[in-house]
């Protein structure tokens, strides 16, 4: 008799547990789907961030015996059009390349960019007695004699997004500004160059 009552109370308990489990699973699923949508939104939206190379110049340029000395100055305009997302930029690495050969690189300090903000990031990159491949040396010498050179500027940063008090994981941000023309004559002005973003 005692056994029977125990079974009778156990049965509804089991049933209740099942309902609770299904409800919990459903809730977890909804939360997961919501989270996936949020992450998607965060990853897609920041692609609208706009990066422009606003100024670039080269000084102390000297090509001798397959070696290069040069000082590059770049100003990157970073525009965050979002009204909700702010961005933490860890060390941004600037690299200037010519025909896929790295000429110089430098890193700038981390900074925080609020929403709806334009930040100008400046960097000075130096090539000090850099050994060039013979073909790169030859092409660079020819281009230099024309009064301008075309380089590529690559930027790499680890970023985190902030929405309200929530902060995302790190994402790798790659920015490429291709065919950036640097003039050797002082009277020629730098032409702003839009850059491409990879997240
Ligand atoms: C670009 O940089 C050069 C060299 O630093 C400077 O003389 C020039 O005024 C700058 N141009 C702009 C638009 O900031
Ligand atoms: C370039 O560097 C070489 C070797 O250091 C030097 O002899 C030459 O005078 C330099 N040329 C210029 C234009 O500064
Ligand atoms: C670059 O500068 C260094 C130090 O000032 C000098 O020793 C070297 O000869 C220079 N190289 C070129 C290619 O100008
Ligand atoms: C963008 O944010 C930086 C850093 O907080 C600030 O110094 C700068 O004035 C802001 N620029 C604009 C246009 O709001």
Image (tube, rainbow, N blue to C red):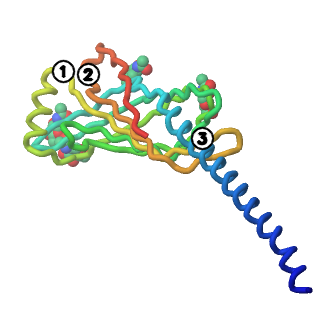
Q: Image quadrant of residue 133?
A: top left
Asked if the residue under mark 2 is in contact with the one under mark 1, i.e. CB atoms within 8 Å, the reply is yes
SS assignment at label 3: helix
| Coordinates of residue 173 in the picture (x, y in percent) | 44, 42
Q: Quadrant of the N terminus?
A: bottom right
Mark nearer the N terminus (1 vs 2): 1
Along the line of sight, the residue nearer the viewer: 165 or 183: 165
Q: Which residue is mark 2?
A: 183
Q: Which residue is mark 1?
A: 147
Mark 1–mark 2 distance (CA, rounded to whole Å): 6 Å
| Coordinates of residue 80 in the picture (x, y in percent) | 55, 28
Along the line of sight, the residue nearer the viewer: 152 or 10: 10
* Residue positioned most to the front: 1
Mark 2–mark 3 distance (CA, rounded to whole Å): 45 Å
Mark nearer the N terminus (2 vs 3): 3
Mark nearer the N terminus (1 vs 3): 3
Q: Which residue is mark 3?
A: 38
SS assignment at label 1: loop
Residue 75 vs 91, above or below: the answer is above
Q: Image quadrant of residue 104?
A: top left
């Amino acid at each position: 008799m005692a056994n029977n009552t125990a079974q009778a109370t156990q049965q509804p308990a089991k049933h209740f547990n099942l309902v609770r489990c299904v409800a919990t699973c459903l809730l977890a699923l909804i939360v997961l789907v919501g989270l996936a949508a949020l992450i998607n939104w965060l990853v897609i939206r920041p692609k609208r961030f706009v990066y422009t190379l606003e100024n670039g110049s080269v000084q102390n340029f000297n090509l001798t015996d397959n070696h290069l000395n040069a000082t590059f100055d770049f100003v990157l305009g970073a525009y965050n059009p979002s009204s909700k997302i702010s961005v933490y930029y860890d060390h941004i690495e600037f690299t200037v390349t010519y025909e896929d050969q790295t000429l110089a690189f430098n890193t700038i300090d981390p900074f925080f960019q609020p929403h709806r903000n334009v930040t100008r990031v400046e960097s000075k990159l130096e090539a000090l007695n850099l050994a060039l491949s013979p073909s790169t040396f030859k092409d660079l010498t020819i281009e230099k004699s024309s009064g301008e050179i075309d380089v590529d500027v690559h930027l790499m940063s680890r970023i985190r997004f902030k929405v309200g008090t929530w902060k995302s994981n790190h994402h790798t941000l790659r920015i490429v500004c291709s065919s950036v023309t640097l003039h050797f004559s002082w009277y020629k002005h730098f032409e702003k160059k839009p850059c491409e973003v990879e997240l």
